[in-house]
Structures are given as structure tokens and as C-alpha cells.
Amino acid sequence: MAKAKLQKLDQQNLLRSLQETGRDEACNVIRAGQNLISFCCNDYLGLSQNPDVKNAAVNAVLEYGVGAGASRLVTGNHPLYEQLESLLANIKGTEAALVFGSGYLANLGVPPVIAGRNDLIVADELSHASMRAGIRASTADSVLFRHNDILNCRAILKQKRHKYKNCLLMTEGVFSMDGDLAPLADLCNLAEEFDSIILTDDAHGFGVLGQGRGSAAELGVSDRISLQMGTLSKSVGVYGGFICASRAVIDLLVNRGRSLIYATGLPPSVVAAAVASLKIIQTNKKLTNLPILNARRFSRRLGLPDADSPIIPIITKTSKKALESSQKLMNEGFLVTAIRPPTVPEGTARLRFTFSARHRKEEIDRLAATVLKIGLV
Ligand SMILES: *Cc1c(COP(=O)(O)O)cnc(C)c1O
């Protein structure tokens, strides 16, 4: 049974496998004995390798041990959580914040608490798999609107909103596979018009847009979005997920969020490292601006529209071409993983380039020249 399913995936160029990959302080990786420069890592600021962040983790291991021991509601709520959550709330400018085991767990846990029976969830069709899992875990009715299509979203709200008690609007701040930004100001207007609340997933905006504060800050709507989710695993360079909101919402999530209540807390070293990393993000604006400047250097070299985020996709349409192009780049010393369905819609397979503060100009220029040479654009 499993073998037949695998064979079918392989025939469709959709088979995936885990590749052992080592990473160093810069953006170099080693895979199957080959040294490559990675342009597909979400460690946008290189903080996963930062000496202060590493030291914070090491010291916490020596002081507190390696595991949390239980759920945060039992004995897993290490004193360092308070520091981490107040830092997050401070950076985001919200009353409170709550840290989950991962971004996936935050997105799985939050929607069912905010929207249930007699409620409606309206979400962008390209919302991340973890958001879709949260929507599915909720007993609310749900509808998807066309990607970033405000008119379509409005039509859905106009047709359906009045039949429900509460309405939750969900979108990504920066779309993970496309790198474009959600029209957050327009969505905020819709939310006000239709008495709805907004949840943004800012996994790829936090730490790199709005001076590190994320896409809502970049677009000047921080105080209009009640639920701002993010991850500690990308620009923060560590692990874990979070949601920033009002004190009341956070207290409700502590009482009802199943993926928080029934999962073990993060290891103290992870919490300590995230604190150290956030302190850097909070103060080092030069660093947080670099990934997008690097992405723009690349988009300009290729004559593409200016990048809005550190993510630039080049659509190959077929999975076969995505795999072949990825291999060609690998032959030239670059790691850019092919992204295929079901991660992206059918017919939109792509190479997804991500830019880090740690990339050197010369590496970006060489990558752009190679992309042109292999005829990708
Ligand atoms: C990576 C990602 C997540 C999941 O976050 P983790 O901390 O890796 O679990 C959620 N949403 C989006 C848009 C992501 O890209």
C-alpha cells in the first residue's frame, strides 16, 4: 500500500525525501559532500548561529537542564517565559503574548478558541497548511477568498457574515511561498465594516519588515489587528511559535488552547535563546533591514519587480522543471529547493529564493548571473 502510493508520487515528480544537511555561521551548507550556498533558509538574520544567542542556550542548559518536564500549565512554565512573552508584547506593541511549542501549534490552537459553533472563518486561499489545520480543528463554518482579492473577500462577507455570531478573518502578513504582502489596511477596513476580527500569520514578516516588528508595523496597522501570530523559528533563528493579543484573549487561550494545554513546554534553552535573539532584533535595525535589501539586489539584477519581502519565487509551472532547475543551480554551487504541490497550487511549482542578512553581495550577483545563464527568467 505504502509502496504503491510512493511510486505514484514519484511518477508525478512529487516524491520528497529528507536530505542530511549541515549549516555553518554564514549561508553555507554541506549536502552529500558538496559545499553549497543556501538561498532557501528562513534564518533571515543568521541568528541561529549568533554567538550571544548560542551562549544563552548553552548557559540555560547548564543551569536548568534540557527538557521542560511538562505542559506549561503543569510544571513547564519556566521563569524565562515571562521575559520572552513581555519582550514579544513589547516589540509588537500589544498588551500580552503567548508562546506555543511551534508556529504550527499556535496556528492549530488559536482558531478553534476564537471561532466555534455559529461563527464564521474567512481565510485567504493561500493560507499556510498550519492555518488550514487550525481552521479544520474549529467547529466554525469556513470559506476561502481568492488570494489577496479584497473584492472577493468583501462579497463573501456581505453574503454570509449576517448569518453568524462572530467572524474571524485570517491571512498571512507575508505569503510564505510568494513573498507578497497581504493588503492589511484594506482587510482592516473590511473587518471594521463587517464586525470581524483579524488573525495574521507573520511567520515571514516578523524580524524583517517594519524595523523587525513585522508586516502590520510595515503597513501601519499594528493597532488594528487583534491577533498577530508569528514564529520563533525563522528570523528569530530558534524554535517556537507565538501570538500577540489583548490580555483577555491570551488568558482565554491559556484556558482553551488545546495545542498549548496538551503539549510540553519548550526547553528552557530554547526560551533563553529566543530572548537573546529578540533583544538583537529589537535594537539592531540595520540587521533587520538587510534581508530585503539583499532580495532587492537580486530582483533588480533579474529585472523583476522590486521584492516586497526576503522571498522571491520564480514559477516553473511543472514540478519536473522545478526539480531540473534546482539541480542545475546545485551544479553551480547553490541550494534552492524546488517547491511543488501540494505546498503550492497545481501548475505553480517553483523555485523559492530566500535572502538572508548573511548573504554577501558577490554571492547574490553570482546567483543572479547563474539564474540568467540557465534561462530561468
Ligand atoms: C513556517 C511557517 C509556520 C510554522 O511555523 P513553525 O514555527 O515552523 O512551526 C506557520 N506559518 C507560516 C506562514 C510559515 O511559513
Image: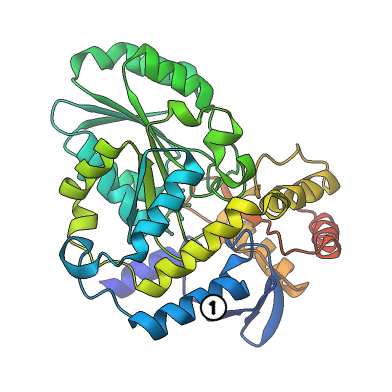
Q: Secondary structure at mark 1?
A: helix
Q: How many marks?
A: 1
> Could you say where residue 373 lies in the image, as x and y percent from the top left?
85, 59
Please tell me which residue lies in front, 227 or 81. Answer: 81
> Could you say where residue 121 lies in the image, as x and y percent from the top left?
28, 30
**For the N terminus, which image quadrant?**
bottom left
Q: Is residue 292 above or below residue 119?
A: below
Q: Is residue 35 above or below residue 268?
A: below
> Could you say where residue 376 lies in the image, as x and y percent from the top left?
75, 53
Q: Is residue 316 left or right of residue 256?
A: right
Q: Is residue 34 above or below residue 346?
A: below
Residue 167: quarter of image:
top left
Q: Is residue 151 visible?
A: yes
Please tell me which residue lies in front, 72 or 338. Answer: 72
> Could you say where residue 46 lies in the image, as x and y percent from the top left?
63, 65
Instruction: Name the residue rendered at 53%, 81% in the picture.
Output: 20
What residue did someone put label 1 on? 55
Residue 178: quarter of image:
top right
Instruction: Name the residue rendered at 73%, 52% in the picture.
Output: 286
Q: Is residue 236 above or below residue 266?
A: above
Instruction: Name the residue rendered at 31%, 16% in the picture.
Output: 195
Q: Amino acid at mark 1?
A: Asn
